[in-house]
Image (tube, grey):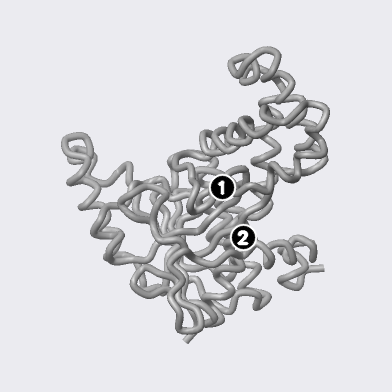
Amino acid sequence: MKYRIGLLTSLYDDYAVELLQKFDASIEEGFIPAEVSFVFCSRAKGSSQKSNERIAIIEGLKNIKPLIILSARDFQPELRVQDRKKWRLAYDREVMKLLPEADSYLNVGYMQIIGSEMLETFDILNLHPALPWLGPTGMWPEVIEEQAQRPFPYLLATRQPDLQEELLKIMSISWNKAGGMLHIVSDEPDRGPVISWYEFPLVSPTLDELWSLATETLRNAGFAALKESHTWQELVQEIRHEQFKGEDPLILLTYQKLARGEWSIKNKKLVTNKQVLPGGYCLKHDIANFLTNKGIKNLIGKP
């Protein structure tokens, strides 16, 4: 029996659609030897034109079926207003009745808070744009901004003329790295058991120049002025750009390994070679190879 993947989404943005398309292509080409048991969507047709367009795209995918919809907005609206906790439990229970069996589940922009009962029943993986042991937790804009702030004490402690020479050393410190992880959703946001992750130092020709400019602004005008500057916005966007490169490879490579039986999830933890890896597995080198080989199109056999 093939490995079965369940996908949970709200289709609020195009990224969710793009990731589902990549899953479809990866399965079609045999890169992920699995089947998608279902896509569940909490947003119904008719909620907006964009939602209708996204749903139509998902319905047209060859290897991702069926699409199951239960509108959160339309489910017991009176209870939702009166008691959100009871409503969440009722909605989760109704969702669980509708879902076919799967070996694991992936949150692809599923915008509903999931209650404890559903979390205990299913292994639901979630992408978070931070390192497992460092965080931070929260929404990605705040996460990226906090990662951008961390290196400044080290940068300020370095003499300005030596900054370019010291950047690689400074950014190799664990505290000054960024990355992403797939973890199992738990009651504690962004702190569930880690399955896989990657890291990268915050260096590149573009980032090096921005670190120099930002440090100079910080020395001369202070942090409030830096945060109002165009340099700060560029720095945050560039870190997000570098971080984003690893997200799709992390997801697809993780599911490749799960589907091939190289990995398994037991008792909410990653198991490989009969060994439990409580901190998950670092796919940094696999992702580097993925990107060197020109990414998804090359690895799934696309021209």
36 left or right of 121? Answer: right
For residue 302, the mark is none
Quadrant of res 230: top right
Q: Residues within 10 Å of mark 1 (few under 14, many from 20)?
A: some
Q: Could you say which is closer to the camera, residue 174 or residue 267?
A: 174
268 left or right of 57? Answer: left
Name the residue type under label 2. Answer: Gln
Quarter of the figure that contains the C terminus: bottom right
Residue plotted at (55% across, 49% down):
54
Q: Could you say which is closer to the camera, residue 187 or residue 63?
A: 187
Residue 7 seen by the camera: no
Q: Position of residue 166 (x, y in %)?
A: 77, 39
C-alpha span from label 1 to label 2: 14 Å
Indicate which disc, 1 or 2, sits on the residue closer to the N terminus: 2
Image label count: 2
Q: Residues within 10 Å of mark 2 (few under 14, many from 20)?
A: some
Q: Residue furthest bottom?
A: 1
Name the residue type under label 1. Answer: Glu
Q: Position of residue 108 (x, y in %)?
A: 49, 54
Q: Position of residue 111 (x, y in %)?
A: 41, 45
Residue plotted at (47% across, 87% down):
1
Secondary structure category for the residue under label 2: helix
For residue 21, the mark is 2
Q: Position of residue 69 (x, y in %)?
A: 39, 56
Secondary structure category for the residue under label 1: helix
Relative to 157, residue 89 above or below: below
The label nearer to you, 1 versus 2, is: 2
Relative to 92, residue 140 above or below: above
Residue plotted at (65% across, 78% down):
30
Q: Could you say which is closer to the camera, residue 203 or residue 141?
A: 203
* Residue corresponding to mark 1: 53
Q: Could you say which is closer to the camera, residue 187 or residue 301?
A: 187
